[in-house]
Amino acid sequence: MTTLFAALAHATGTLIARTQTRHTHAGRLRFLKQIDRETPRDQDLHLIADNYATHKHPKVRAWLARHPRFKMHFTPTSSSWLNLVERFFADLTGDVIRSGSFGSVNELVRDIKACLAERNTNPKPYIWRKKGRRNPCQNQPSPQSTRQRSNRMSYEALFEIQDTGATNPKARSGQAAMWNPCAVS
């Protein structure tokens, strides 16, 4: 088994990532330190995370208290789709994990790292796109199928990758950066 920690720079589409064998608070701390090393010191970092216990562990909270440029924001329960890094995880799952065949965890990690390196060579930010409302009176599907369709649409259709041809200059200008760190096991 392996865990992927990933942080997505909202403005540029760049990823910071790390794989580990377990999802623990110690791994979370290593990842936060990696983010700290790999981002400009003059930027405030707004981190969006789910409510997983490792994100709120006392040692993680203590580290965050000593690093005030890190500002944590937590998504509501069952709303992980609001975190843009989850869109990347969906792409990674479709492009690498489902389409691959792995003889070992090391082969899987190798392919994940290759995907991350390729993506960071030419990063593209995910952009929220507002979709028009569907007429709720059409075809009156069952509540279960409506919920499934609505969740799928929320997760898949609201995101697009924008190819800007260049990174966003605001991401380097000392303004606050929006990072979406999360982990998937």
Image (cartoon, rainbow, N blue to C red):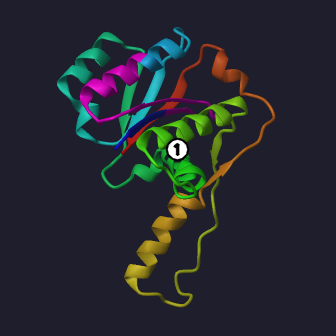
User: What residue lies at 66% left-to-right and 52% top-to-bottom?
Assistant: 160
* Quadrant in the picture for residue 117: top right
Q: Residue furthest right?
A: 165
Q: Give how far across and how far down residue 95 sits, in percent.
A: 60, 52
Q: Give how far across and how far down residue 68 sits, in percent.
A: 37, 13
Q: Is residue 183 magenta?
A: no
Looking at the image, residue 14 sits to the left or right of residue 27; the answer is right
**Count of all numbered marks drawn on residues in the image:** 1
Q: Is 151 above or below relative to 160?
A: below
User: What residue lies at 37% left-to-right and 34% top-to-bottom?
Assistant: 73
Reading the image, the residue beneath label 1 is 84
Looking at the image, residue 101 sits to the left or right of residue 119; the answer is left
Residue closest to the eye, 151 or 111: 111
Q: Which residue lies furthest to the bottom in this view?
A: 139
Quick one: SS at disc 1? helix
Q: Give how far across and how far down residue 31 sits, in percent.
A: 39, 24
Q: Is 38 above or below relative to 16?
A: above
Q: Give how far across and how far down residue 14 sits, in percent.
A: 61, 30
Q: Mark 1: give few (<14), some (14-19) or many (20+) Cα within 10 Å.
A: many
Q: Residue furthest left?
A: 58
The image quadrant where one finds the N terminus is: top left
Residue closest to the eye, 142 or 100: 100
Which amino acid, by three-letter code, is at mark 1?
Leu
Question: Does any portion of residue 12 appear in the rendered image?
Answer: no
User: What residue lies at 25% left-to-right and 22% top-to-bottom?
Assistant: 61
Q: Is 75 above or below relative to 122?
A: below
Q: Does the magenta stretch include residue 20?
A: yes
The image quadrant where one finds the C terminus is: top left
Looking at the image, residue 66 sits to the left or right of residue 5; the answer is left
Question: Over which residues does the magenta segment extend?
Answer: 7-33
